[in-house]
Image (tube, rainbow, N blue to C red):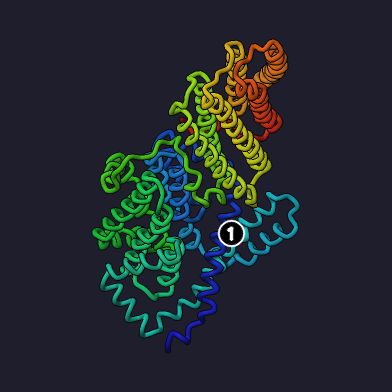
Amino acid sequence: MGLSALNWGAILGGFGLFMFGIKFMGDGLKAVAGDALRDYINKATSNRFSALLVGIVLTMIMQSSSATSAITIGLVRAGLMTFEQSAGIILGATIGTTITSLLISIEIDRFAMYIIFAGAMLICFGKKPRSKYNGNVILGFALIFFGMASMGDALASLKELPQFESFALKMSDSPLLAMFTGVGLTALVQSSAATIGVVQKLYMAGAVTFAAALPFMFGANIGTTVTGILASIGGTTAGKRTAALHTVLNVISTVLGMILLVPYAKLIQALFGHLNPMMQIAAANIVFKTLTTLLALPFVTQLTGLVKRIIPGEEEQMQDINIDEMDEEITNVLPSAALLASRRAIDQMIGLVRENSLASLKLLQEKGMSPEKEWLDNTEKNVNKCDQKITDYLIRLSVKPNLTHRNINSVRLQLDVTKNLERVGDLIMNLAEFYVEVNEKGEAFTETAEQEIVAMFDQYMQMFDLATEIFRYKDVDQYHELQRLEEEIDRMELEYRDTHFKRMAFKECTSPVAESVYCDILGTLERMGDHLCNIAKATITRKSSDISDDELLAE
């Protein structure tokens, strides 16, 4: 009997259904619990025990510790979490991933077709999106077991193949070979749950011994770190350290398991030998990962210190957000978390625009080509860079199918704010060009004209700070105050235009360029105020459905 005699259709098709079921169920759970996941992740900043719980819950929902690791790395890279805060989540992911092997072991596959029917009915006839998402969860759940049942029946024939029998004997005699086989298979399929599911079916069929199954399972522990390593490539120091921590933890636990392989196998057989073979593997997986995780928890500080020595360098500050480095998976799984990252980037953009505003005033007051102009040019490039990155990111996020109505409103608000900030930045550069033009000609504004410009600029700065406060805290009373300031700046523009025309009539202006651009400066300041009012109006309009700053991670 050769390999061609195996029912490869059932093996590959069953495995495909299993993998699809994991993803389909995970996607449904993400859609149902997306905002709740964000809240759990926020709580992870408090202490390592709550972070451990978040990692467990997130991995149970994701059905993949690899995906949890990749998402956590993305959150660290985005500045939503520090490297130290990620450690607990990584540890929790190790325990959370055991749930799949437990579910497989209780042989739900006998009811898989009925569960498939229930899920399909919800998807086909459910009228509300939530009903359809629940249908996805149920259908995916059933496909996991239906796929494993199809694959398991075909894998049972492996034990009759001389080639596999020889390889299985080698794995039994050489635990290292079994371990590296587990590493390779898990790295290939990107799912330790899938690898352990295969081991369960092989052990159930009698194709491998318990002595070979355990190292195979340990190897899956290392193979699952490959996803995180790939997610960290080219990222921040903190992101790379998070991936390294996952790898270090799993390598240490696997080495410990291999050293204690014989006594551990005897312990599991003594405690759970009366259970069915698949349940024995599930129990071995749960006990191993829970014990190693709990043992590692008190040493998180030492482990993070070790990783910092392995990957030296300074971590980027949390406010230095690079939207390009936000893992794409976060937009698929946690749109609310992605929105929090873009909110942080908008805060950074607000700071840049404010600095540019003050720098433009220095050009007026210093009466020369100071270094301020060069600095202002460079900062404006950063403003435009922020605008492009945030807008591109929000547009990508806006087409995701799992957005709630609240998420959609937040995306629209952030796009409005970003565009108005970018326009204010452009107008600041217009002001700078006016001042530079006057300075280059060796001219100056009259003392009264300069005082009027400064007075109007001070009014604009009051509006700027008030508008950004409204964006952050959604205060309607502040919005009314901003509207009053807008009316005042409009009045100032008209009044100062009139006084300027009188100066011109009485030949008080002796600088032709300054005389020419004065009204343009007033108009530019007034338009900057309009864009600030646009920001506040968009915020108050969407007040009830946007994510508030209270929900941002602690600074």
Check the image and report above or below for 107 versus 32.
below
The residue depicted at 37 percent of the width and 51 percent of the height is: 243
From the viewer's perspective, is residue 359 above or below residue 393?
above
Q: Nearer the viewer, residue 408 or 88?
A: 408
Q: Is residue 475 left or right of residue 363?
A: right
Residue 199 visible (yes or no): yes
Q: Is residue 432 left or right of residue 528?
A: left
**Residue 233 position within the rendered picture, expressed as x and y whole percent measured from the top left:** 40, 54
* Front residue (pair 541, 359): 359
Q: Secondary structure at mark 1?
A: helix
At 36% from the left and 58% from the top, the residue drawn is 221
Amino acid beneath label 1: Phe
Q: Residues within 10 Å of mark 1 (few under 14, many from 20)?
A: many
Asked if one can make out residue 38 in the rendered structure from this viewpoint, the answer is no
Mark 1 lies on residue: 24
Front one among 541 and 302: 541
Which image quadrant: the N terminus?
bottom left
The residue depicted at 55 percent of the width and 20 percent of the height is: 443
User: Splitting the image into 4 quarters, where does residue 147 fall?
Assistant: bottom right
Residue 158 x/y as whole percent: 42, 80
